[in-house]
Image (cartoon, grey):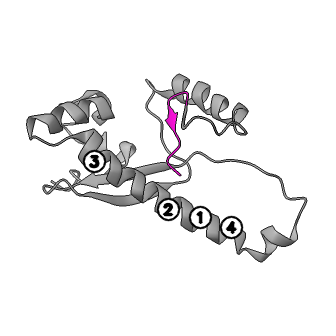
Amino acid sequence: NTLSHITNHCIQETSESFGQHEPGNELFFEGLSKLLADAAISFEDDIWPQITSILCCVGAQACDAMRNDPSAVADKTAPRCFQLFGFDFLLDAQATIHLLEVNGSPACAETLRETIVRDLVAVLLDATDTSSSQVGGFTQVW
C-alpha cells in the first residue's frame, strides 16, 4: 500500500480506505495511547520521551542555525516572531519513533483548530512566565 506511510492529508484522502479506521485518518495521542496499551506499550513512558527528545534536538539545531545566521545577528531591528511547526513521526514495530518531516505550514485537524489557536495565544501571552511547563494544551519540552 503506497499510501500507508504518507502523512500528507491531501494525498491520503484519495485512498478508498480514507477514514476507515478513524475520522479523517487522524489518530490523536489519547487514541494512540489506547492502541499501544493493548500491545503493552506505554505512550507516556515509552513513546512520549522519544518524541520530546526529537523535538528538543530539532529545536536546539534551529536555535543554533538562527544564532549563527549573520543576517539575523547583524539586523537588530529584525522583527521578533514565532511559527507553529508540524512534526510527522513514524512509529515502527519495535516502538521506536522516527522523525519523517517538519512542516513549516502544517495542516491542522478541524477538531483541534480552535483549541490550538486559543492555547497558542496563551503561550504567547505567558512567554515570560517560566514557572510552569504547561500552558494551555502545550507542554514546554525544551
Q: Which residue is mark 2?
A: 58
Q: Earlier in the sequence, mark 3 or mark 2?
A: 3
Q: Residue at x 20, y 50 (%)?
A: 4
Does 131 appear in magenta? no
Q: CA distance from mark 1 to mark 3?
A: 23 Å
Give SS at disc 2.
Answer: helix
Q: Does 140 lie within the magenta span?
A: yes
In primary-sequence order, the first of circles 4 and 2 is 2
User: Splitting the image into 4 quarters, where does residue 109 fall?
Assistant: top left
Instruction: List the residue tagged with mark 3.
Output: 47
Q: Nearer the viewer, residue 79 or 23?
A: 79
**Amino acid type at image mark 4:** Met
Range of magenta residues: 135-142
Return the residue found at the far left: 39
Q: Amino acid at mark 2?
A: Val
Q: Which label belongs to residue 62?
A: 1
Q: CA distance from mark 4 to mark 2?
A: 12 Å
Chain-order first, disc 3 or disc 4: 3
Instruction: Indicate the position of residue 137 as horizontal and vertical percent values.
Output: 50, 29
Is the C-beta separation of discs 1 and 4 under 8 Å? Answer: yes
Instruction: Give the residue at the far front of this rendering.
Output: 131
For residue 113, above or below residue 32: above
Residue 80 in the image: x percent, y percent?
A: 79, 51
